[in-house]
Image: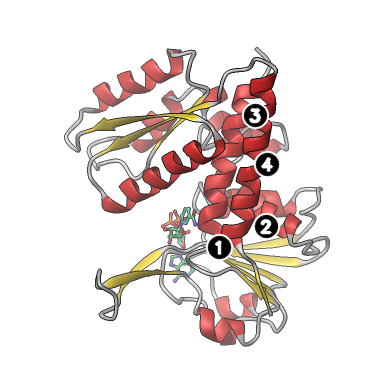
Amino acid sequence: MILIDGKSTSLQIQEEIKARVELRAGDGHKKPHLAAIIVGDNPASRAYVGHKIKACERVGFESTLVELSESVQEEQLLMEVEALNNDESIDGFIVQLPLPDHIDDQKVLEAVRPDKDVDGFHPVNAGNLSLGLPGFQPATPSGIIELLKRYEIETSGKHAVVIGRSAIVGTPMTLLLSRNANPGNCTVTLCHSRTQNLEEITRTADILIAAIGRPHFVTKSMIKPGAVIIDVGINRIPDPSRKSGSRLTGDVDFEGASEVAGSITPVPGGVGPMTIAMLLRNTLEATERPV
Ligand code: NDP
């Protein structure tokens, strides 16, 4: 069984990005600049943004954090987005999700200038992805593609099963796996909460991607021997043995799955760090875009 190490792969990519930034600095280019808007005090969101800012420092990017209170009005948030759209020193920015209930996420995401939308959530970038045109790709599925590539996992002609159809993970994942590219050329089945006979389907998967948000949902019996298992889930579960009283775990029962899988990503240390690396890569691309 091969452990697909997203943490070390992410660090390797960050080293490559850092080298590129230094090379560009030598040619007189400014540092790439990523901004993030965070609304409220959700601890998970704060942790994710914190990781992204730290990664910016590691690779030599500038970063700006715009912190807004939980009670911020949608109009004010849209003004902050517009300010970042118009700030030419900012190459790309993200609005950390989820947003409070009184704010329309979609309206905010659509306000981001597509050429600064390094999360790839704007309909223009989502449309480009579905048409196979250049644009920013969402970081999590593109991080998975990068892992498949760097681990030289054969995808052509394979049956990939994706569980979860969200706009940020499952749906773009199916597009990337099915396109005529390497990695790609999979025959893809997209499963969701209404899928019937899920276990029968997953047992036919050469590549199984779990993006559900339910701890240990994918068990050993759902896996074809030798399959590649990619666990996107990040779930906090109680763990009295930890000082914090909890720990993070994936959508896959890692121990059971490891007994049958050919290769598998751990949680933490799998897809999560790759998401950050791909966000940095998108920001570097935003910096290098033709003016
Ligand atoms: P969503 O809640 O948006 O989507 C979950 C999907 O899982 C839905 O399509 C849902 O189906 C499906 N689902 C739920 N229950 C079942 C079931 N019993 N059987 C089959 N399908 C089911 O989640 P996200 O895509 O945003 O995130 C998924 C997980 O990935 C979460 O744990 C999240 O924290 C994590 N995540 C990790 C990232 C990383 O960097 N590693 C980045 C983003 C997310 P339906 O559409 O029918 O409701």
Which residue matches tag 4? 16
Q: CA distance from mark 2 to mark 1?
A: 9 Å
Residue at image x 74%, y 67%?
159
Mark 3 CB in 8 Å range of ligand 1?
no
Q: Amino acid at mark 3?
A: Glu
Q: CA distance from mark 1 to mark 3?
A: 27 Å
Q: Amino acid at mark 1?
A: Gly
**Dot 2 and dot 1 residues touching (CB under 8 Å):** yes
Helix, strand, or loop for circle 1?
loop
Which residue matches tag 2? 147
Can residue 221 be seen in this snapshot?
yes
Give the mark nearest the N terminus, 4 or 2: 4
Q: Amino acid at mark 4?
A: Glu
Give whichever of 101, 259 is nearer the camera. 259
Residue at image x 60%, y 48%?
172
Q: Which mark is residue 270?
A: 1
The mark closer to the camera, 3 or 4, is 3
